[in-house]
Amino acid sequence: MKKIRRFFERVVEGGFLVSSTVTTLAVFFIIFFLFKEGLGVFNERPTEPKYVLIAHNSNKVDKLTSAQVKDIYDQNITNWKSLGGANDSILLFSIDDLLNVYTEEELGPELEYVGEKINAYISERPGIIAFIPVSYIPSKEFSGKEIILDRISIKDFFLGREWFPTAVPAAQFGVLPLILGTLWVSLFAILIALPIGLVTAIYMAEVAHPKARRVLKPLIELLAGIPSVVYGFFGLVVLVPLIQNVFNLPVGETALAGSLILAVMALPTIITISEDALRTMPVSLKEASLAMGASRLQTLVRVTIPYAKSGIIAASILGIGRAMGETMAVLMVTGNASIMPESLLEPVRTIPATIAAELGEAPHGGVHYKALFALGIILFVITFGFNLIVASTRRKNKAA
Amino acid sequence: MIMKTKKQINQNIAFWIFRGISFLVVTILFVILGFIILRGFSALNWTFLTSMPEDGMTKGGILPAIVGTLCLIVGSIIFAFPIGVMSAIYLNEYLKESPLKRFLRTMTENLAGIPSIVFGLFGMAFFVNTLEFGDSIIAGSLTLGLMVLPVIIRTTEEALKSVDKSLHVASYALGASKMQTIRKVVLPVAFPNILTGLILSVSRVSGETAPILFTVAAYFLPHLPTSIFDQVMALPYHLYVLTTSGTNIEESRPMAYGTALVLILIVLIVNLLANAIRSHYGKKVKMK
């Protein structure tokens, strides 16, 4: 009998052991999949699938970066000379222009002659750059050649100032505006939340009546439990029109709205962790200070807070981490502009909001898809880094 | 006459400022809750909760979203609760303080710190694509389950820690094995706090949008789910689309308020229950 029971117990204990490996496995799997998809972006060319960029056969230029293509089509670059080619004006052409040049009869009722016509058109214009579907390239003697877009480089990705994944003919994947947008909104949020949260934590830990504290604690937990969408909803319906009116803006979706909402969302984290830090102070230190004639306030400022300093710093870092990782609330109130942030009263885009907004439309496995995973890597590394810092400070403290 | 020294006056001013700011925080909470309750109250009725949306989401109800959220709650808890509790038991009862234990604890903390959108990315890459579950209840539940797993582990560990050591010792002294002790002594004592952790996870799962955006959520389904490989509507996602991308944003507003109110009610009820359990059973669980 005892042996059977022992056997079952061993089995169950094995189950416990296996369960405890799940979190570790999950973390490694998450890292693996993020990096597998995300790092692939540096192997990709930001082209539109099934379309090519064509230049005349005689053109010396055969490679371009996506930034250069954008400048060409924005007409910031107008001569092939600046790209290393001959001194010739760049002539822009895309498939839609075809109808302006040839009549429908010339192109054929089922578009059979389009390939020929394109070929003829290109051969007459050495300065041309054409953006056309691959299917219209004639199989025999083509007067043009494909311009290969450079792969996305690490420098272009991290320092590129434009995030425009749906640009044609070359998508732009510069994450700088997104990183700055995230930092911009989160740092302001913490700037607001930290003083308020700290003071509330001090109040709860040191000043409040035990009854008041017993009421406050569940209320703070309630604040923490409100879902992100609900905060976003409130922000969109109340805060955004308010900001629009107060500051006389064309739209109220601004970084300011995002910071305010994030501040409220980060408050419970800051409050609870700071409060815990303040309460761990040995009473003897407090009593010693009071015995020497210091008021409660003086004790607070000169003894308690310095003692709890590392806990308070941990609270702020975790608060920043929480703010940076927030998705829905920010998505709903900061507007839709992936631009370099310059003021609080303009729309802005954060990394999580970008991922949430664009992943649904990114073709699976394509450049955009991988770029969004790369954004996920950035986000993960930042928040993971913060958590590591906090964890190691905590361990250092315990040792001390 | 009581002379107030400058020190005393400074302290009084400071403490009143502290009170004021704390009051501000509570006011913010009440403004948000009050706003949604007041505006959503009129939308909330039996029809709203039990019928399908109609007319481009401007009329009818949110039944499929409620059902969907329930499915996701059940699915994620089925995955996360047993694994979470067993992990916590193993960590607390079987492992001694060692680098391994610290490593496992760190891993749990790391998982807890991952932003919800990253869970959504992973869920899509792994469950939806690699394992080819597609956008489904099972993909969404597993993703959400991973997200709340650290919460359950943390609260269960706290619950187990708060069980007095003397109970362990007494049980061994009577000849019980470790497993018997756990089963018949430790778990029953820790149960209320474990339960608290469970319902807090329920609240968390019901409100999260980012993990389900690309793993299960659908904008509109004309029928209720019939298998775990079905897509499903969900309350938080429903609120999001009603507010930002419906065809009739203005007219759907009352429905949005109602949905927000349902979400708030879930959080309120769960928090009330958690507090009731905690105060009834006396032991406090530390929440972070």
Image: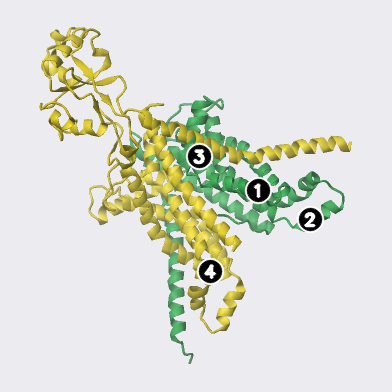
Chain colours: A yellow, B green
Q: Where does label 1 land, which residue? A: B101
What is the chain identity of the residue bearing mark 3? B
What is the chain identity of the residue bearing mark 1? B
In front of the other: label 3 or label 2?
A: 2
Q: Amino acid at mark 3?
A: Trp
- Vertical order, A375 against B102 (above or below): above
Instruction: Give the CA separation, mark 3 to mark 2.
Output: 49 Å
Q: Where does label 2 land, which residue? A: B167
Q: Amino acid at mark 1?
A: Lys
**Element carrying mark 2:** helix
In front of the other: label 1 or label 3?
A: 1
In front of the other: label 2 or label 1?
A: 1
Q: Which mark is residue B46?
A: 3
Q: Quadrant of residue A83?
A: top left
Q: Is residue A269 visible?
A: yes
Instruction: Give the CA separation, mark 1 to mark 4.
Output: 28 Å
Residue A170 pos. (x, y %): 26, 29
Q: Amino acid at mark 4?
A: Tyr
Q: Quadrant of the N terminus of chain A?
A: top right
